Image: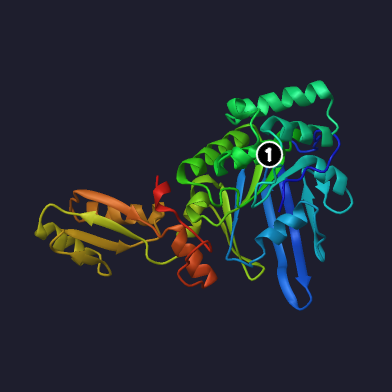
Amino acid sequence: MTSTTATATPATTTTTAGSPAITVTGLSKSYGDKVVLDGIDLHIPEGTIYALLGPNGAGKTTTVQILSTLIPADSGQALLAGHDLVREAGAVRAAIGVTGQFAAVDNLLTAEENLLLMADLLHLARREGRRRAAELLRRFELTEAAKKPVSTFSGGMRRKLDLAMTLVGRPRIIFLDEPTTGLDPRSRRTMWEIIHSLVADGVTIFLTTQYLEEADQLADRIAVLDHGKLVAEGTAEELKRLIPGGHIRLRFLDPDRLESAAALFGSAAYDSEALTLHIPSDGGIPALRAVLDGLDDASIEAEALTVHTPDLDDVFLTLTGQPKPSGDAINSPKENAR
């Protein structure tokens, strides 16, 4: 996809505080006999980050293309910024911005010229266009490179400029389709900071990503799409609790206390050398409280307690039935660990 902002003036939306930025009901799309989207529903509050995960071919980019008015759906309804996707397509385009998988910038122009070109396409007044370009160059730390041709830019600089061009029209909803693909860890973190700053300004972010940790770090809510269907939706922590393998780990000062605790929690596995006990748990507060109450009632003192839950890699692989990913299919870069 390319960066698009098909509107003549900055967006004026009808959303109010706390209202949904995007509401989708029964969205479907097929190409011949191949069903790409099979009646998905979405509810995304404004001023939040919503991540859509899924294996290649699951329908993520098709969802973005439909909601950004680039292609029609076969059926279903959608409201974006209070506007009907079909009947008010122009108003929808005025409220959104799209940054695709590949930076849609002109290599022969400078950074400033790219931004001014976008301002001209939006029919902004010349003075307003220059003011907006200068503002975005400062925000994205591109002022020193403003007069340089984009062909000399690094990948991270190109992605920042691409997102800056999307913001010229002040969209209230931004679709980021795999915005950090190919970036090094430092550039990826810079993009994360920019995304957080946009949400702080009240912008809604619809994010598709191949980096599971990116969704874990950024998203308020995450949906998993597989074979055109939403197979799970919730916060990162809620999704992790869906997958077995979570446990509460207790460490004790001596073998006697370990053995007493092991007898108390019959289903627990323990390590006599490390003096630790692993109690199966979903990581929720009720389960944690039950363990603490049990220890207290039995007058057993633990030296340390930690809660372990599956990560998004486990969630993704379990829910989609995918083999261990490799290459650029799905990535969880360890260099980005918190």
As rendered, which of 178 and 308 lies closer to the eye? 178
As rendered, which of 61 and 306 lies closer to the eye? 61
Q: Residue furthest bottom?
A: 33
5 vs 248, left or right, is right
Query: Residue drawn at (78%, 40%), measured in percent from left and top?
Result: 95
Q: Residue 123: x percent and y percent?
A: 86, 32
Q: What residue would you read off at disc 1? A: 18
Query: Residue drawn at (64%, 31%), measured in percent from left and top?
Result: 148
Q: Quadrant of the C terminus?
A: top left
SS class, disc 1: loop
Instruction: Classify mark 1: residues with Cα within 10 Å, few (<14), some (14-19) or many (20+).
Output: few
Number of marks in the rendered image: 1
| Residue type at tag 1 | Gly
As rendered, which of 154 and 15 lies closer to the eye? 154
**How does the figure colour the protein chain or chains?**
rainbow
Q: Is residue 31 visible?
A: yes
Q: Residue 192: x percent and y percent?
A: 53, 41
Q: Residue furthest right?
A: 87
Q: Residue 25: x percent and y percent?
A: 75, 59
Query: Residue drawn at (67%, 64%), measured in percent from left and top?
Result: 59
130 vs 296, left or right, is right
255 vs 2, left or right, is left
Q: Quadrant of the N terminus?
A: bottom right
Quarter of the image for residue 21 reads top right
Q: Residue 140: x percent and y percent?
A: 60, 31
As rendered, which of 270 and 333 lies closer to the eye? 333
Q: Is residue 47 visible?
A: no
| Residue 201 higher or lower than 290, as above or below | above
